[in-house]
Amino acid sequence: MRRQEARWTPLTLSLLAGCLQGVITANGTTGKTVTDCDGGSCGGICCAPDAECVASRSTGLPTCESICEKAIDCGGSSNCCSPRYRDGGLGSYAGHGDCEAYVTSSPIPCLCADTADCDAVAGKGEECVPYVNADGLMVGPYTCAADDGKANDGCASPGGSTQGCVVPPQFCTADGIGNQFCSVSCRSDADCGNEGVACCNCSCLPGRCCGLCSSGDGG
């Protein structure tokens, strides 16, 4: 009996080559197969070297997000560099963020250095302020927040003049960069509740208020 020879079509050869190289393609996205993931799979695929697997803040599902350090690192529809924190969001800043889409009604913050960064991402009406976590600790870094004078938010009016903070005992505080935000008064770094991260180094009406140690007014 004569053995029938296998006939390989161009499509079959292409798929086989993909399997041999550990590469899969779906919906136009190419990534390593699960078995070739160095750091484990992320929803069935591997993330690129400049991305990480995180839980989507909109769906909760695992997704690959580009790693960033500032807004300029992101682009397109994912124009917000959203910071990541250790210990489920209550710990210290992880040192980087992930590029995500900016949504006006979302509590997801965007990294910034000054108000210009917030204007580029969200338009007018937000100020660059030190991030305060759910426990009320100033953990940083700087993120965009509403410029409305509420607790831990911005307090610079659109015209650039200082407006008051509406939640006592916070005062409108200015740091060495020029950012203006609502914070509490202090006499020492210990009063700021997170020594080494939050310092008594910014200017406010009582004299000194808490800000991030890395960007006080030098006074």
Image: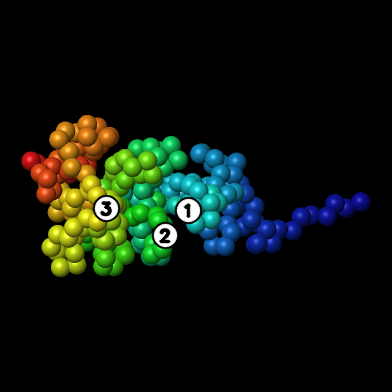
Asked whether the beta carbons under mark 3 and mark 2 sit within 8 Å of each other, the answer is: no
The residue at the point 56 percent across, 44 percent down is 41
Q: CA distance from mark 2 to mark 1?
A: 10 Å
The residue at the point 76 percent across, 55 percent down is 6
Q: Nearer the viewer, mark 2 or mark 1?
A: 2
- Left or right side of 47 for 113: left
Q: Where does label 3 land, which residue? A: 167
Asked whether the beta carbons under mark 2 and mark 1 sit within 8 Å of each other, the answer is: yes
Q: Nearer the viewer, residue 64 or 58?
A: 58
Hey, what amino acid is under mark 2? Ser
Locate residue 136, reporting x and y percent: 33, 42
Residue 186 against residue 169 in the figure, above or below: above
- Tag 2 secondary structure: loop
Tell me which numbered mark, 3 or 2, is placed earlier along the sequence: 2
Q: Where does label 1 land, which residue? A: 57
Q: Where does label 2 land, which residue? A: 106
**Res. 113 visible in picture:** no
- Left or right side of 9 for 176: left
